[in-house]
Amino acid sequence: MSVAPSSAAAPGSAPAAITVSGQVVEGVESGCLLLRAPDKTYLLIGGDRAVLQVGKQVTVTGRPTPDLMSTCQQGTPFQVSSVQGG
């Protein structure tokens, strides 16, 4: 797994963008996609769904948004800004 911060966040600001690699898996709720990384599971918000396909190994860059409300009820919400792999 690769988790690399791309910038430091100031106190009270949005979390820093990070890059995470793992496998895309289907959530228990319809339409929910998760990224299973070795140490954490992220709920993928946004991103190219043509690349984010169940079973694929991908690398995503974005920001964790743990306070985001979701009907998916799994993983830490992660706002995807870019995705590679598939």
Image (cartoon, helix red, strand yellow):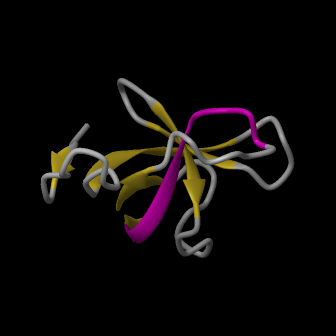
Relative to 5, 13 lies left or right: right
Relative to the observer, which residue lies in front, 35 or 69?
69
**Which corner quadrant of the image does residue 59 belong to?**
bottom left
Is the residue 80 above or below the residue 14 in the image?
A: below
Q: Give the residue furthest to the top.
A: 39
User: What quarter of the picture does the N terminus occupy?
Assistant: top left
Q: Position of residue 50 (x, y in %)?
A: 60, 75
Observer able to see residue 12: yes
Q: Position of residue 51 (x, y in %)?
A: 52, 70
The residue located at (80%, 35%) in the rendering is 28
Looking at the magenta stretch, what is its main secondary structure? strand
The residue located at (49%, 48%) in the rendering is 65
Q: Position of residue 58 (x, y in %)?
A: 40, 56
Observer able to see residue 86: no
Q: Position of residue 20 (x, y in %)?
A: 31, 48
Relative to the observer, which residue lies in front, 8 or 4?
8
Relative to 58, 75 lies left or right: right
Relative to 74, 51 lies left or right: left
Q: Give the residue furthest to the front.
A: 12
The residue located at (13%, 58%) in the rendering is 7
Is the residue 44 above or below the residue 81 in the image?
A: above
**Which corner quadrant of the image does residue 37 belong to?**
top left
Check residue 86 for magenta coloring: no
The residue located at (56%, 63%) in the rendering is 52
User: Magenta segment, which residues?
Assistant: 72-83
Q: How many marks?
A: 0
Relative to the observer, which residue lies in front, 50 or 62?
62
Check residue 81 for magenta coloring: yes
